[in-house]
Image (spheres, coloured by chain):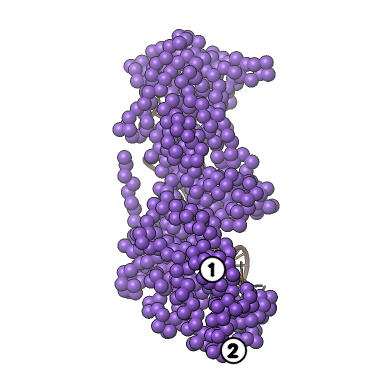
Amino acid sequence: MSEQKAPAPAANFIRNLIDEQNAAGKWGGRVETRFPPEPNGYLHYGHAKSIFLNFGLARDYGGVCHLRFDDTNPEKEEQEYVDSIVESVKWLGFDWGEHLYYASNYFDTMYACAEHLIQSGNAYVDSLSAEEMRAYRGTLSEPGKDSPYRTRSAEENLDLFRRMKAGEFADGAHVLRAKIDMTSPNINLRDPAIYRIKRATHHNTGDSWCIYPMYTYAHPIEDAIEHITHSICTLEFEDQRPFYDWLLDKLADGGFFTRPLPQQIEFARLNLTYVVLSKRKLIQLVDDKHVDGWDDPRLPTLMGARRRGFTPEGFKRFTDQIGVSKSDGWIDMSVLEACMRDDLNEHALRRIAVLDPVKLIIDNYPEGRSEDCFAPNHPQQPELGKRAIPFSRELWIEREDYEETPPKGYFRLYPGNKVRLRYGYVVECTGADRDEAGNIIAVHCQYLPDTKSGTPGADSVKVKGNIHWVSARHAVETEVRLYDRLFAVPYPGKERDYIEDLNPASKRVLRAQLEPALKDARPEERFQFERHGYFVADLKDSRPGAPVFNRTVTLKDSWAKEK
RNA sequence: AGGGGAGUCGCCAAGUGGUAAGGCAUCGGAUUUUGAUUCCGACAUUCGCAGGUUCGAUCCCUGCCUCCCCUGCCA
């Protein structure tokens, strides 16, 4: 097995920053990151980028990466999502040891911090309605104005906040706000809300709280509590960094945390062509049944990727390849597909499957006779051995491997042409039978008995074409699903509603004829079906002795391009 | 419009005051019992545009243009 060389990780602005800080001794060489999903949905390809970034940095710098659930909004979060997230991160190959955390575990500390902010004059209880608050906030180009409640005394604020916590007020009656600057050009600094009253049962803390911290407020505290050094998030949080720093600075002054404080760093999230990665759209695709659930192999979720046959190693190659930067561009789906092919090419055993079967009858081969042909499990790795494939008079071949009037450059079966039946004999095509409607029902040929693969005469006849086949008598028939890109266009929704851009041919279900060895494929076992692509035995629908296969990705096909 | 970001080959992406890595894609060619893989070769006189500083600028300065994000008691 050829071991992957591990080249030095590509330089990126985050690694450069860490190197500089290490040189300056800022963290004493410590690198501590976190992957902080909100458990309100399933992880998707974009999360894979973040996971490899955060866990990868920690690994490469000898640090740790925490898995932390950012569960500050009980209305949207569920245990089912945390379970699925845990499973997906593990599947990608990462281990957080004992560093599994929940924002909700810090609610007491967050509350104490809030009281301190109130006492130090940095937060106040506002009693404006949501609409009023919006009006007071101003606009992008006009400054906001102070709420009439902004000047409440620390005592009054503390009393009100404690009563908020005690459940004396209705949802939305009051909100705790940081007191910063209503005229700031950065809207995030115009006294952002940091606590709201919300009577909802939390998946972790149940009904013990009726006030919950906002992400903006909670996240920096979570980072500080866990001694995170580099808090990596996506670009849209850039405007929030000043608040992140403001908050931690105030709390450090208050003795809650010590400096140096964690630092927020933003990178460009993944944009991938031919799919959508927004949570809202993913939910709609599932709810409106455009796909078959959250783990539909066409969906860009990690659960879908797994059923599709994508590999963790393929995702690693992918994230290594696309890099990390602050310019938000689009990665073409072909890059991900190429990464999966690279990994699969190396690791998947080769097998034969006829997906669109038509009979090939060898008229000069004795009826009732059969013999074994031997095929390598991996052409580049002979140490993986060979397997026997039965050969007989009637075979299944691909319908597209016969053309009565071949296009230019076609070198498969057509009357008069010779072709090798891969790992078997060279045959000469003599024609085909058609039904009354003109459909081809069987192709006929004569075999050349001296040309069997592996025998001295194998190369006595040179042929260009080489097609795969399966003995009709021995074949295993099974369901094979041909998956393709979910959307028919690179940028779904660009020209019209994205639903209209769905690829109608993203899933095709076939009955295929497979070589006998495939009968016992185990769920998640991956193969290359020669000349077709990579396939995986479906995790959910396969049964012992009756696998169902999903196409992961096709092989590159330069003939298709030529046509 | 105010604020925050980004602009280097078709798509990503390194790089730096000294004369443009790499990957994907593409195009040639070799090997091949997968029209696969592998291999070899080609592929930015040029770094959004315009000025300026400099012996020399993609890197520094000035102005401009384009794109993305921000007005949730979401994250």
What colour denotes chain A?
purple
User: What's the residue at 55%, 21% (across, down)?
Assistant: A358
| Residue B30, placed above or below residue A43 | above
Report in which chain the residue with disc 2 lies: A
| Residue A233, placed above or below residue A163 | above
Within 10 Å of disc 2 (Cα), the crowding (few <14, some 14-19, many 20+) is some
Q: Is disc 2 placed on a helix, strand or loop?
A: loop
Q: Closer to the camera: disc 2 or disc 1?
A: 1
Percent x, y of residue A360: 52, 18
| Residue A417, placed above or below residue A74 | above
User: What's the residue at 57%, 17% (across, down)?
Assistant: A442
Left or right: where does residue A230 sit relative to residue A133? left
Left or right: where does residue A95 sit relative to residue A446? left
Marks 2,1: beta carbons within 8 A = no
Which disc is residue A71 wearing?
none
Percent x, y of residue A418: 48, 18
Percent x, y of residue A346: 38, 40
User: What's the residue at 43%, 11% (across, down)?
Assistant: A369
Chain the render paints brown: B
Which disc is residue A207 wearing?
1
Which disc is residue A152 wearing?
2
Q: Nearer the viewer, residue A476 or A277?
A: A476
Is the N terminus of chain A in the top left, top right, bottom left or bottom right quadrant?
top left
